[in-house]
Amino acid sequence: MAARLACPACGETYADRWRCVCGTPLEFASAPRPDGPAPPFASFDTRRGLWAFDAFLPVEPRVSLGEGFTPLVDAPAWDATFKLEYVSPTGSFKDRGAATTVSRALELGVDRVIEDSSGNAGTAIATYAARAGLDADVYVPASVTDAKRRAIAATGARVREITGDREAVADACREAVTDGDGWYASHAWNPAFFAGTATFGIELAAQRDWSPPDAVVVPLGHGTLLLGAYRGFRTLVEAGWADDLPRLLAVQASGYAPVADDRNGGSAGTNDLADGIQVREPVRRAAVDAALDATGGDAIAVSTSAVETALSDLRDAGFGVEPTAAVAPAGLRAYRGRGVVDADADVVVPLTGRAK
């Protein structure tokens, strides 16, 4: 039986719903936890992908393309370690959430999933839906790149192009869900997606013998990776498998930086290069702020030129990433310039999406 959902604001519970009647994003009513001490990393069957951590997951393992267990690679030029999420099956960390979300859809007997996305999440949901034998509609901005549009369409999903910004796309998608056209496999609203991205934190700690780094620098749009990382690390601390939470340092694109602007003043200019995080109103804004506060973290915004420089440096170093994936390395340099990150700090930076 599929796990029930609960509203963290009013306490209402549901068998299945995309948000609470009070408007709050839902969470799983309960979260599984393993018993006993942390096992050695070698005891995990990496062939199962992120489902090797199913003891932590409120979703049954029903669909997989081998997502998870992405490499950790030294990056001396940045005095950091990169976690190469862009080598995931469809080329981004969103595969983690897609695997668990589509598995949840299968638990519920869904026939068609619907998602709104600027690219990577839509590609991931469409691909995993195809793997599971489900139909999919993906709503995208009319301005989405040809490469991302083709990647979604290649799965057999229907691409619904909407004129306007990301909010217009989301509104059109949710209207279709309300009309009964399909099940909302949203990377921003669906709690199953965050169950998947939580494996980022669990896996990273496991790869380091259950010792989280001092800090993790992540790009921030809706917060799917930041919140997933936070929940994964927090789960490990609650289970007694890790001692401390790393600082979570968020990086937003200038002009689309509500969290950073509130914390560090308004950002100058508009960074349209980092199109994957063009989000002015994160769905789970309160949870993002709580995660940053709980870890002693922060949020800053970076300009187009900073991302261009970081992207060029990354590609010169052999990292074939998309512009949005360069946001976090650019942010790390900015944090170091501000003295927020010490020179000798143990820092991990996920490279979130591959070049397309």
Image: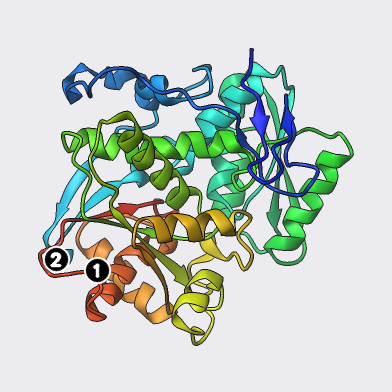
Q: Which amino acid type is marked by label 1?
A: Asp
Which percent across, then down, holds residue 234? 37, 41
> Which residue is painted at 40% across and 31% down in the image?
67
Q: Is residue 96 visible?
A: no
Placement of the N terminus among the 4 image quadrants:
top right
Where is mark 2, residue-wise?
77
Q: Nearer the viewer, residue 17 or 108?
A: 17
Specify the farthest residue to the bottom.
268
Q: Is residue 200 left or right of residue 161?
A: left
Q: Nearer the viewer, residue 268 or 306?
A: 268
Q: Nearer the viewer, residue 179 or 119?
A: 179
Which percent across, then down, holds residue 38? 23, 24
Q: Nearer the viewer, residue 11 or 207?
A: 11
> Which residue is painted at 45% across and 44% down in the image?
228
Which quadrant of the figure has residue 35? Answer: top left
> Which residue is painted at 18% across and 41% down in the image?
211
The residue mark sitting in front, 2 or 1, is: 2
Label 2 and label 1: CA atoms lie apart by: 9 Å
Give the secondary structure at mark 2.
Answer: helix
Tell me whether circle 2 and circle 1 mark residues in contact (CB < 8 Å): yes
The relative height of residue 93 versus residue 99 in the rendered view (above or below) is: below
The 10 Å Cα crowd at callout 2, few under 14, some 14 to 19, many 20 or more, is: few
Q: Which amino acid type is marked by label 2?
A: Ala
